[in-house]
Amino acid sequence: MRKHLAIPILCVFFSSSAHAETNAMEACSGIVNRYDRLKCYDMAAILKPAPRSYLTRAWDLDGQGNPDADGIRRLEPYRKNYALIRYTTNINVTPASPSPNHAATIPFPYQNIETKFQFSAKSEIGNYRDLELLGFRNFRLWGAFTQQAYWQAFNVGNSSPFRESNYEPEIIGTFGTGNMQGWKLLNVGFSHQSNGRSEPASRSWNRFYLQGGWEWQDIHVMGRGWWRLPEQAAKDDNPDISNYAGRAELVVHWLPDRDDEIILLLRSNLDAHGHKGFMQLDWASPFNIGRSSQLNFQLTTGYADSLIDYNHWQTTFSIGIVFKEW
């Protein structure tokens, strides 16, 4: 009888360790008596930790991510990584800006069909896991980088040029609330975005932003507002960029099931009398391409699809692959 009582206690001990599920199952598998073994498995299933939500995984809000020996998370996805073939209704062959010497004088021979790539990753720089400040429970500091590239791959007659590349390094501080549902985090960030080109095609801006994250089961929402750092008029490549690229954005992310993923991005200049904005809708379908990617459809319309197109309106339709998070 004492042996029978000791077995469930042993299971509880193993299931409460750092590797709860694995250790508990290993303990149960070694039990000879069938009744006691089944009882141990039942207890291990009850004590199995709840799955981590999307925002919790993305920003390691519970501190249970993939830390190395020093407790710092390694390189991981930030925004989505994808490769798409897209068609635009209005290719920008004469990009222009009100800044002096920032207008194309000769139209470029661009085609309406091109490829679009995005690579985005972040890495944790430091953390403070036991924070008690204004209702926040923990803090993490991240370094992030996103690159978008627009390649005229089918424009063979003009040497298939890269029409535009945008580079965006960021520093992000994440304050976690510790809430299971509702408001999950507050991000405080600095972003520099540029296309690395010389005049007349040079475009760039710097921003400070605040971003909140909310989550309810399979839906999470990220809302962000920013303030552009002013520049000297003589050095400003795009003085009116906030009127087109906006001052705030909202991202709604829905996971209707294990395989589908739908993301809606809305951006606005918050000007009721001269509103300009941008909308992007992505659907990663259940159709898997290998083990690491899914078929992805993307629709965009509005201004600022890229920096060179910040004041250019267009609608695009894209199909390609989105790479799963590693």
Image (spheres, helix red, strand yellow):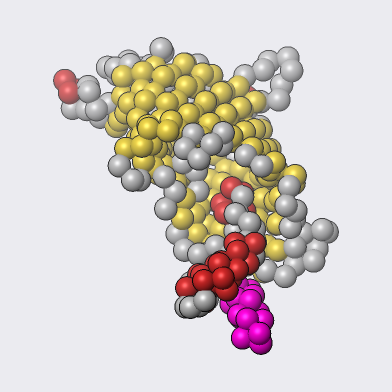
Q: Residue at x 49, y 29 (%)?
A: 282
Quarter containing the N terminus: bottom right
Given residues 101 and 284, the one toward you in this image is 284
Verify whether residue 50 appears in magenta. Answer: no
Q: Residue at x 79, y 66 (%)?
A: 132
Q: State the residue lying farthest toward the bottom.
A: 2
Given residues 238 and 294, the one toward you in this image is 294
Residue 70: x %, y % from top left: 52, 76
Residue 8 versus residue 283 in the image, above or below: below
Q: What is the chief secondary structure element of the magenta stretch?
A: helix
Residue 136: x %, y % from top left: 77, 59
Given residues 92 and 35, the one toward you in this image is 35
Q: State the residue lying farthest toward the top.
A: 89
Magenta residues span 1-17
Residue 209: x %, y % from top left: 66, 44
Verify whether residue 3 appears in magenta. Answer: yes
- Residue 99: in sight, yes or no? no
- Residue 128: in sight, yes or no? yes
Q: Quadrant of residue 101?
A: top left
Q: Quadrant of residue 221?
A: top right
Q: Residue at x 56, y 52 (%)?
A: 58
Q: Quadrant of residue 278?
A: top right
Q: Residue at x 60, y 22 (%)?
A: 277
Given residues 268 and 291, the one toward you in this image is 291
Residue 298 versus residue 127 in the image, above or below: above
Would you say 127 lies left or right of 97 here? Answer: right
Residue 305: x %, y % from top left: 48, 26
Count how many numbered circles sit on residues in the image. 0
Q: State the residue lying farthest toward the right.
A: 134
